Amino acid sequence: MSSVTLLSTAVFADGDWPEKEELKFGFIKLTDMAPLAIAYEKGYFEDEGLYVTLEAQANWKVLLDRVIDGQLDGAHMLAGQPLGATIGFGTQSHIVTAFSMDLNGNGITVSNDIWAQMKPHIPHENGKPVHPIKADALKPVVDSYIAKGKPFNMGMVFPVSTHNYELRYWLAAGNIHPGFYAPHKGDISGQIDAQALLSVTPPPQMPATMEAGTIYGYCVGEPWNQQAVFKGIGVPVITDYQIWKDNPEKVFGVSKEWAEQNPNTHKRVVKALIRAAMWLDENNNANRPEAVKILAKPQYVGADADVIANSMTGTFEFEKGDKREIPDFNVFFRYHATYPYYSDAIWYLTQMRRWGQISEQKPDQWYFDIAEQVYRPDIYEAAAKDLIKEGYATPAGFPDFATEDGFRDPQTHFIDNITYDGKAPNAYLQKFAIGLKADDKI
């Protein structure tokens, strides 16, 4: 179908034509790329007069580089990527996001051997482990490795990934030091003073890398935790929903330059993605079985539909046979999941500071300024209002734009019971026993 045909089905307000009709978006093969696949498959991009190609990328770095150099118009990104790029950790480039793709969706898995060593330290009820499982149960295992002079290796997907920060958060809450970064000294290994050594492994390679014994556990998005259960090589011990209930996960990112050159196109992309997110969550996730079939296609996630369905349809399997209800494991629209909250951006920045990716103390205002540079709720609001006007959405699904300031209420659902208030980032950092705070510097 040509872009001309697509345009003939779209309705444009005066001066609202897309500046660019043919677009290429990148993604990594994870279930949380779903809004892109659904917007494509359900014709929501077409409704906006956009002719979109979706293209899987080899890894997060390649994906980011291709957005920066213009080979991709935008991409499914780790929430930390636009922030890390904008502040110059890793690749320096101003990236913005006007759309948060989902909440939750990750897990931490350990090998069968490590699980066997953890089990004696985990309380049981009716023969089953009591959840959530804290890293306190892993602490004696890590200590035994250190006592033998053996490194305790774990995998995460990228230095500025949610997975890195979630894994670090869980480990530190169990008094296991995950190590510091020192970019000012040229050390970006993240392993200074570490008791557990974290390194990057691309998501689809996680199970095989653990099976080979290179890593003993990992934090990754689906379907790669459930894959370990299906293959019988490991046990997911906790989901990120249990580490931080309803945590923001991926975003849709574009370069600032692209956003400035294509404001109408950008708004229309966000409209299509909002409609996809609504479809994914509507009627109590009634569309999820259909979404699973779509995502199982080789051009999207390409994993077995049964593996994808395990988490996408509201259950999660820990030990083989220990399947538990987690209806909000993947959230795409509920709880204002798609709104780009400044407080979400600030949480990621606090973790970058906590682990040394931000080398020096920054005033609270710096956190607010960076959040405003990268997160664009103004674009989201314009898209949402258009959808309401066109009858595709109702105001009830969105924040009250007249009063919304971009900050969630203080959040209390963390595994260590520490409250996060995005309006007080430095005070938040002071609460952690492990991690940099105030004027600490490596």
Image (tube, grey):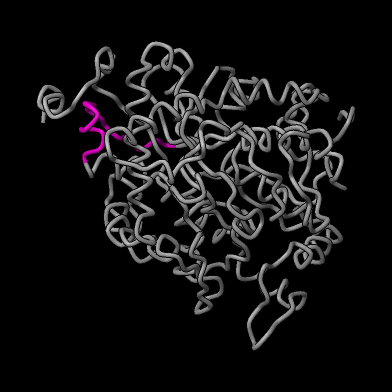
Could you tell me residue 72's position as x and y percent? 37, 24
Out of 418 and 111, give the one closest to the viewer: 418
Residue 88 is left or right of residue 293, and the answer is right
- The foreground one among 173 and 121 is 173
Q: Magenta residues, as a range? A: 43-58
User: Which image quadrant: the C terminus?
Assistant: top right
Q: Is residue 273 magenta?
A: no
Residue situated furthest front in the rendering: 402
Above/below status of 87 relative to 190: above
Q: How many marks?
A: 0
Image-based side of 68 in relation to 414, left or right: left
Q: Which residue is painted at 76% across and 68% down in the image?
A: 137
**Residue under the point 77% across and 75% down:** 121
Name the residue rendered at 78%, 42% in the picture.
179
Of all residues, the one furthest to the bottom in this rendering is 126
Using the image as rendered, state which of residue 271 and residue 150 is in the foreground. 271
Quarter occupied by residue 268: top left
Position of the N terminus, as image quadrant, is top left
* Residue drawn where x is 65% and y is 22% of the image: 370
Q: Position of residue 377 (x, y in %)?
A: 51, 28
Q: Position of residue 260 (x, y in %)?
A: 43, 12
Q: Work out whether 15 lies above or below 430.
A: above
Residue 242: name its quadrant: bottom right
Residue 386 percent coordinates (x, y): 34, 29
Q: Is 57 in the magenta?
A: yes
